[in-house]
Amino acid sequence: MDERVREHAAVLVDWSARVEAGDDVVVSVAEDAHDLGVAVAEALGERGANATTLYGSDELSRAYLKGAETRADGDRNGNDVDDDTDGVPDFDDDPAVDRALFEAADAYLRIGGGRNTTAAADVASETRQAYATARKGVREARMDTDWVSTVHPTRSLAQQAGMAYEEYRDFVYDAVLRDWEALADEMAQMKDALDAGEAVRIVTERDDAPDTDVTMSIAGRTAVNSAASVAYDSHNLPSGEVFTAPYDTEGEAFFDVPMTIDATRVRDVHLVFEAGEVVDFSAEAGEDALAGVLDTDAGARRLGELGIGMNRGIDRFTDSILFDEKMGDTVHMAVGRAYDACLPEGESGNDSAVHVDMISDVSTDSRMEVDGEVVRRNGTFRWEGEFGE
Amino acid sequence: MDERVREHAAVLVDWSARVEAGDDVVVSVAEDAHDLGVAVAEALGERGANATTLYGSDELSRAYLKGAETRADGDRNGNDVDDDTDGVPDFDDDPAVDRALFEAADAYLRIGGGRNTTAAADVASETRQAYATARKGVREARMDTDWVSTVHPTRSLAQQAGMAYEEYRDFVYDAVLRDWEALADEMAQMKDALDAGEAVRIVTERDDAPDTDVTMSIAGRTAVNSAASVAYDSHNLPSGEVFTAPYDTEGEAFFDVPMTIDATRVRDVHLVFEAGEVVDFSAEAGEDALAGVLDTDAGARRLGELGIGMNRGIDRFTDSILFDEKMGDTVHMAVGRAYDACLPEGESGNDSAVHVDMISDVSTDSRMEVDGEVVRRNGTFRWEGEFGE
């Protein structure tokens, strides 16, 4: 086994999830994530934790949902066996085992890495939505644990990234095996700037793309130093971003990093904000998918997140939000739901059924200001030596 | 996908586990059992059941136990972090997640089929025992569900059977895809004979092997018609045996079918019984492993089971007890623990930490009598046409 697999497991168990002896840990292992699952199991045994391992197979999930569709169609018995005749499966909204499982868990480690990132592409979106809605309670119980999501580098993910397998493995370990303590210290400076600030302005002026010039309020909001550890309210490995929950957005923003929404490729998104809302939008590709997102509900037209990518171990886009949004020299904004951790106690931020991140490369011809003071220019931060003028 | 995989899933879900809409079903999928896992997931979706899928990986289990051994060694921190210094890992005897999981489950479907049947060969037996002891509560919660154990044909199991992969698949499906209703009816005749009887005598006289001539009492005991369904108190797929819990065994028995005990090959076992106990024993190979079993505790020297193999879809020995003990033309006896289902309500039968089955080929020169009447001769039953003299 590649020694980096063991190092990845140690970072996940110790730095990210802070597992201690006696903890009840649920691990979900995707189809091709076996090796990291083995390394994590060994680490959990060594730490004196209990381990329960789920099989996180997209192909099994697809099969279950397709089976439910067949049931809803009434194909099997020649008549509809569901509670209604709308053709959409009804799912149990209190699945006892999954709820009991997560309620009893201290930590949940999700190891992605299937055999096919589009394994469930032929499941109807109504079916997915019905399933997701029914499993709200399970999701909440899962989010109440010290959960961390990571991926094992697989051929399927390498393919999605357009990379050779060996090249992709190097990419993943460069992103994951960092000096997280040092990065957390650096990110703390960005968090401090955002926590102290009232307004953020982001400007990008490049010859080959529409300008970005957008301002948003962050007064009263708390930034999260997302240092890939539950100790920092951070649940992704890798992480390496500082994010907050902005409001009252004004201006326009251009997102040049390609993304995938519901299996549709979306490119070169342009959004125009007035009084906090998206009032106009366009995309070079996938505009219908973008429109679908923005029309989900009222909150889908307002920002739920502003994130500053600070993980310089991530040096290219791989069509995976887990990595893309953390890349150094990037900024991202998400329409939709805001994270509670950014909001004052008891206050609810922007609410929506969606949370869709859009990313801009800010490595050239760009600046970010907090209360009029430039804190980042062309991807370089104020506290770094070569910040310049 | 081989259509037989879907048929296997349907037998498992409908005939064996009797899954109904709304049931909470836990499925454990071994490393190479993915395809059957997919077919079972689809069937569960179609039946309207909830599904939770565990990853039943022997390699992950081994890694966890090896990690625990490292912890017990105190290797990691240079000192013992366990509660004691005996070098044997301490395990939590109330692992909250696993207990909650099985307590909430209606059914548990275990799909075996790993990549290596000896994947955990280097785990110390003390470690296994400590783990098994700590997990008694979890095991009991699991046994309280409608549990069924089956296997997906894998290359690893084909290798253990000494067969080609394609050949082994045919073997498994011949054993699993039977007319279970018809077999259950046939086996009911054997169950009736055993339930009505007081004593069983088994005799084999072959020139090339030691004789068997053993008698045992079955008065007051209830035979199980093990028809591969929880509706018959039967938890194996395939099954196809009738078994009961004998006592007061006298005589000698020879077991010519090779077996594996704790990774040791054991062959040609000869046992001598007096007043219900094994008073002498030998084996052509693996005698030490046999001695280890018999010395486990007092109950390990008494029979816990007499089983009549009646599944003629199983036509060869494959070094897997799931199949071997159900083969037509065989009989097996197990030293150790008796099954509650064979005992009068409230009565406890032979108790032991072990249950080790030993199998005899009775296809020639043999007979089985119940209360002096021959019910099977050379593998053929009384109620079959060609029973003869």
Image (spheres, coloured by chain):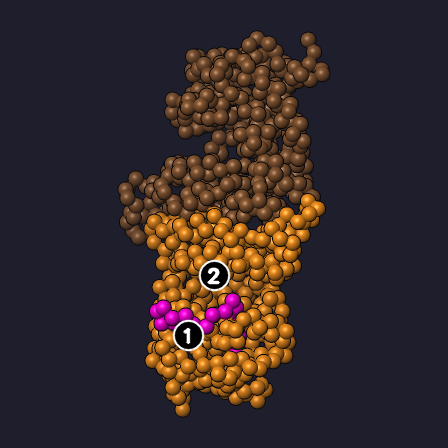
Chain colours: A orange, B brown
* Percent coordinates x, y for residue B143 in the rendering: 47, 35
* Percent coordinates x, y for residue B13 in the rendering: 59, 40
Residues behind callouts 2 and 1 on a single chain:
yes
Q: Residue at x 33, y 42 (%)?
A: B90
Residue situated in front as seen by the camera: B146 or A238: B146
For mark 2, what is the residue? A150
* Percent coordinates x, y for residue B321 in the rendering: 55, 31
Tell me the CA gap for discs 2 and 1.
Answer: 22 Å
Residue situated in front as seen by the camera: B244 or A350: A350
Q: Reply yes or no: does residue A345 show up in magenta.
A: yes
The stretch of residues the image draws in magenta is A343-360
Q: Nearer the viewer, mark 2 or mark 1?
A: 1
Q: Secondary structure at mark 1?
A: strand
For the C terminus of chain B, the quadrant is: top right
Q: Identity of the amino acid at label 1? A: Thr
Q: Residue at x 42, y 40 (%)?
A: B138
Q: Which mark is residue A244?
A: 1
